[in-house]
Image (spheres, grey):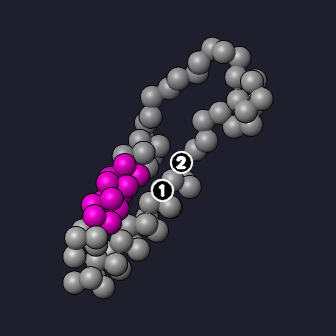
Amino acid sequence: MQSALTIFQIIISIGLITTILLQQRGAGTSGLFGGGGGSGSYHTKRGLEKVLFISSIVLATLFIITAFLSLII
C-alpha cells in the first residue's frame, strides 16, 4: 500500500510541476522594475489557461491529501 501511494504521489508531483511550468507569466520583467503602468491589466482566464489553472489546484490538493495519507499509514 505504501509503495503504491508513493508512486501515485510521484505521478501527481510530475503533473503538478508540468502544469505550473506551462502557465503563462503575467507581468514578465517589466512588472519587476515598475513598468506596469499602474493600469492593472486584469483579464479572465479562458481556454487552456483556465484548464491549466484549475488542474494545478486539483493536483496540489491531491498531492497534499496523499502526503497526509502517507504520514498516517
- Quadrant for residue 37, please give it: top right
Numbered range of the magenta stretch: 55-68
**Would residue 66 be found to the left or right of residue 56 on screen?**
left
Helix, strand or loop for disc 2: loop
At horizontal 32% and vertical 75% (from top left) the residue drawn is: 8
Residue 51 seen:
no
Q: Amino acid at mark 1?
A: Thr
Work out whether 8 lies above or below 34: below
Residue 38 seen:
yes
Say few, some or many: other residues with alpha carbon within 10 Å of mark 1 (under 14 / 14 to 19 / 20 or more): some
Work out whether 66 lies above or below 44: below
Question: Separation of disc 2 and disc 1 at Cα?
Answer: 7 Å
Residue 72, position in %: x, y? 22, 70
At horizontal 30% and vertical 85% (from top left) the residue drawn is: 3
**Would residue 49 be found to the left or right of residue 12 on screen?**
right
Please state which of residues 64 and 45 is positioned toward the viewer in this rendering.
Answer: 64
Q: Is residue 67 covered in magenta?
A: yes
Residue 38, position in %: x, y? 66, 15
Residue 15, position in %: x, y? 43, 64
**Would residue 31 be found to the left or right of residue 7 on screen?**
right
Q: Amino acid at mark 2?
A: Gln
Q: Is residue 59 covered in magenta?
A: yes
Which residue carries the number 1 mark?
19
Say few, some or many: other residues with alpha carbon within 10 Å of mark 2 (under 14 / 14 to 19 / 20 or more): some
**Would residue 11 be found to the left or right of residue 35 on screen?**
left
Which residue carries the number 2 mark?
23
Q: Are marks 2 and 1 in contact (CB under 8 Å)?
A: yes
